[in-house]
Amino acid sequence: MAGTQVAILETDRLTKSFGALAAVSGVSLAIEVGTLHSIIGPNGAGKTTFFNLLTGSLAPTSGKILFDGRDITGTPAHRVPHLGLARSFQRTNVFPAFSLFDNVWVAAFARASSRKGIAWRRADRYPEVRERALAALADVGLADKAERPVREISHGEQRQLELAIALAAAPRVLLLDEPAAGLSPEETRNLVALVRGLKGRYTIVLIEHKMDIIMSVSDRISVMHFGSLIAQGTPGEIQKNPEVRRAYLGGVAA
Amino acid sequence: MSAFLGQVLNGIATGMLYALMGLGLSLVTGVLNIPNFAHGALFAIGAYLLASAANLMGNFWLALVIAPLGAALLGLAIEYLGIRRLYAAGHDYQLLFTFGLALILSEAIILVWGPVGYSHLPPPILRGGVDLGFTFYPKYRLFVMVAAGLLVLGTWLFLEKTRYGAIMRAGIENKEMVSLLGIDVHKLFTAAFALGAYLAGIAGALTAPIRGLSPGMGVDMLGIAFVVVALGGLGNLLGAIAAGLLIGVAQAIVAAHWTEASSVVIYAVMAAVLLVRPQGLFGIR
Amino acid sequence: MNRALIAILAAIVLLPLVVRPAIASEIWIFAIFGLGVNLLLGYTGLLSFGQGTFFGSAAYVAGWLLKHYAINVFFALGIGVGVGALSALVVGYLCVQRSGLYFIMLTFALNQLFYFVAYQWTSVTGGEDGMPGIPRPAILGIDFGNPVAYYVFVSVLFLASLWIMRRIVESPLGKILQAIRENEVRAEAVGYDTARFKLAAFVIGGAFSGLAGVLYAMLFGIVPLEAIGFVTSGNVVFATLIGGSGSLYGPVIGSFVFIWLSESVSTLWARWPLLLGVAFVIVVLFFRGGVVEAWSRFAAWRERKWRSSKQTG
């Protein structure tokens, strides 16, 4: 299906090898702006490694990453959010001793238009940052718990916080790595509603294992297996794809 | 030229001792994941125990066997009574603890043996020199080179070829995995610490006839051991040997031309290497 | 927070009535030193075991200039801060690229480098004998040779340092450094060049250490070799931990405890570092969290007792 819309994030034969093992092998895909594009595949397919390449935590062995048409390959991890790409992690990766508010505030401040007085002004004197932080918490439904420390909230709420930290960076593209990991069915439903609410405002790339989530929210799905892309298409197309069924059901367990 | 070769040989002898110290520290720090500031003190204890035992028994060789065992025993006691309780404590408290121990031990040395340094002669059989053609080389230093080399080789064989050594290496890589395999991690830690203490002790015992004894020798050696580990990498045996030899030889060459710089040069070499390769010689972590 | 400030002001006023002004000055000087170290240790989570490098270097350079070039006091302070910051920049640059145990070892090893340079360069530093004869030049007609006058001077500088450090830790930088301590990977992932920030913390800590070093040199009129040695580095870490690294005021309390202890005991026994070592060991085994945490635990226990007595009463 030829892209009639702009591809905001693209990879061109992106590869990451560890010695003889190719964790990500020649992956070329295009994410269209404003869509929710899911990446699925059995465990070990290379999905998180792919995210790590996109966010600069890993350097690719070969291939290119393009954001908004610009080659951003090799951008160091700390510069990636400033391009407009924010990521949430599969294993909750927050700032444990901070309150919820401080967790998102730190992420929001990184993207402040002005860091003047960074070592001198009181931290609460940046109204723009404060607003963005509170908005991020509100987006995930945690605004009323802003002053609570992280250890007082439930696992499900921590996954929401994980998402809020990514939102606080005011990104254009959200990379969500298994946001529903470890959630109960009800918590998962809430999360899906949350993600649906974010569609349209952000371009979302989603890694998930839970097929019902994938099928219900995705505009497009890419399937990875052993580091390579084996299929791409709409949810309907993917469901009927024999390669995909083989990867998930035959031989190698998901 | 022959003077230069003599310096290089000197450097190899001390370099092997540095490698031995670095190896012991590397093991302890790698397996236990704590900053061990008492390692130098164990080196000093090994040296003083050798001197006393040798004087007491009139037999250098017996003392050479006993002294490191004394250091290892002390290491066992330290691990059992203190370090064992600090594995979850965080590097700052571990550091303070081992640093406190270092202070206690170095002051204890002054209490027992006095504040003034003194020398200890090698055993009669190893006094004098050997004619190597290009230079006349002290027999004792040759002995140290061989002995340290054998110890390093022995440690390598232990780590690479025995089951317990493999467990120790695994412990450096991944402690959770080791305990999941049903191995008592506490015993592993105790053994690693004792082995490290033994290596420090025997390095000290071997050093005594070369450099003499002084209460501050522990701290000096601690810094050098840190340099070896910083350059060679934690848990990296070959790295420790390479780094030890590098700084040993560099020091010997510089010391011959500019004696005042002989202590500084080791750290200067480290700083220079790290400027170019921040990850150390072998680029690990 | 105000209560702590009142307590400190009271301490400043009352201390010289209880101990000699020189000891009182030493306490506040060491507190300045500790504030700098705690920015690294408590706030950023960086255990630098070589702060003596910056303390001692500043003391030597400023001391040299004071002694041989009769510079004025403010210039000396500026030199101290500058040398402390600059040496921290150099050392920090090499160290922040490694983490964890490597970082600790490197700070120690580089400290040894500076120590041996000071030890050997006897023409300048005096080597083992130290650099004596450092003056306390008068300013605006105030004779700082008077110990009380110098004490006031030191106290004012301490209060200024405390205020500056408080501004820093309450600023975004303070939050960012704590974020690095909490989760460096995430801090980087949200867009901070963590190596740069760690280096910044290092330089600031070095500046504070340098200020303390100059004041120390002028207090005792001499820069002893130990000022740049590992024992000084260890002492300030101990003082910070015993006060409690989790708060701004911890190092102040720790300085009290440490200086009081060491000044009382060192006159009694030449082997007093042994007792110091024992104190380190005991604090680690039994008093982790330091005075501040012990106090808050005590306060919490008291609160529980009061509540339960209300219920039963």
Image (cartoon, grey):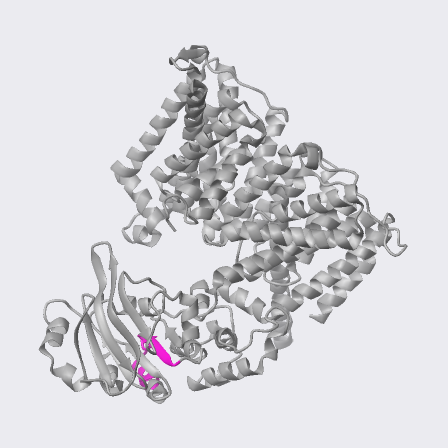
Q: Is residue B16 left or right of residue A27?
A: right
Q: Which residues are magenta?
A: A172-192
Q: Is residue A231 left or right of residue B203?
A: left
- Counting from the top left corner in percent of width and height, residue A197 is at 36, 89
> Is A13 located above or below residue C206 in the figure?
below
> Is C306 located above or below residue A216 in the figure?
above
- Counting from the top left corner in percent of width and height, residue A225 is at 18, 69
Res B176 → quadrant = bottom left
The residue that appears at 43% across and 37% down in the rendered structure is: B22
Is residue B275 located in the magenta-colored stretch of the structure?
no
Res A10 → quadrant = bottom left
The residue that appears at 38% across and 81% down in the rendered structure is: A172
Quarter placement of the N terminus of chain B: top left
- Counting from the top left corner in percent of width and height, residue A16 is at 26, 62
Q: Is residue C86 visible?
A: yes
Is residue A174 located in the magenta-colored stretch of the structure?
yes
> Is C51 located above or below residue A134 in the figure?
above
Q: As rendered, which of C13 and B274 lies closer to the eye?
A: B274
Taking the view exactly as shown, the residue that stands out farthest to the right is C141
Q: Is residue C221 visible?
A: no
Q: As rendered, which of A147 and B223 lies closer to the eye?
A: B223
How many marks the image carries: the answer is 0
> Is C65 located above or below residue C151 in the figure?
above
Q: Is residue B197 left or right of residue A236?
A: right
The residue that appears at 26% across and 40% down in the rendered structure is: B163
Res A83 → quadrant = bottom left
Q: As rendered, which of C165 and C122 lies closer to the eye?
A: C122
